[in-house]
Amino acid sequence: MDKYFRIRPQWSLVEAFEETNKHYQPGSMVTGAARNVQIENWGVLIGRTRALAEIKYAINSFGSKSKLCKHIQISTKYFNMLEDFFQELPDDKKPGKIYQGMTISGYFLLKKIGGGGNAVVWEAR
C-alpha cells in the first residue's frame, strides 16, 4: 500500500472503490464521507461519459445494482446519488468522434495511449 493515496484514471469503477476502501473505511462518519468524495473526484478526473459507462459496465458485471453496492460497500441510496453526480458533469462527447467510455466491437475504451500515421491507439478492456 502506498504511503499517499492517489487516484488513478486507469482504474475501473470497482477498482476505484476497492483501492479507496483500503485508505478510507466505508461506513465511518469521517472516512466514509471522504471515501465518497474521492470517488466523485475519480469521476471528475475521467469525465462524464466514461464514469457513466463504468457504472453501467459494473452493474452488468455483477448482475444487479444491489450486488454491486454490496461488493463495493456503499448504500444503494448513495450509489444513486453518485450516479446523479456523474450525470451532472459536463458533457465531454464530441459529435462523430471516438471517446473514452465508448464500446466498440465489445471493447471498452479506457484512454488514448498513442497515435500517429492517421491512427489512434486506445487502452481497452
Image (cartoon, rainbow, N blue to C red):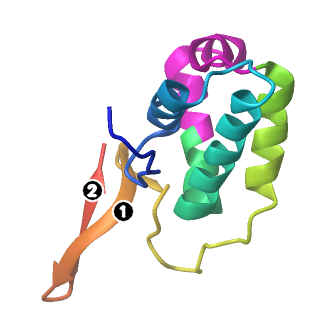
Position in image of residue 12 (x %, y %): 45, 40
For the point 73% across and 53% down, the residue is: 86
Q: Is residue 35 above or below residue 22?
A: below
Estimate the spatial distance between the alpha carbons at disc 2 and disc 1, rounded to whole Å.
Answer: 5 Å
Judge left or right: residue 40 versus residue 120.
right
Badge 2 amino acid: Glu
Badge 1 amino acid: Lys
Q: Which residue is mark 1?
A: 111
Does 64 lie within the magenta span? yes
Position in image of residue 71 (x %, y %): 57, 13
Q: Disc 2 on helix, strand or loop?
A: strand
Dot 2: within a 10 Å radius of its alpha carbon, few (fewer than 14), some, or many (20 or more) residues?
some
Dot 1: within a 10 Å radius of its alpha carbon, few (fewer than 14), some, or many (20 or more) residues?
some
Judge left or right: residue 16 versus residue 28.
left
Position in image of residue 51 (x %, y %): 60, 51
Q: Which residue is mark 2?
A: 123
Q: Start and end of the magenta stretch? A: 55-74
Judge left or right: residue 114 versus residue 83.
left
The single residue placed furthest to the front in the displayed view is 3
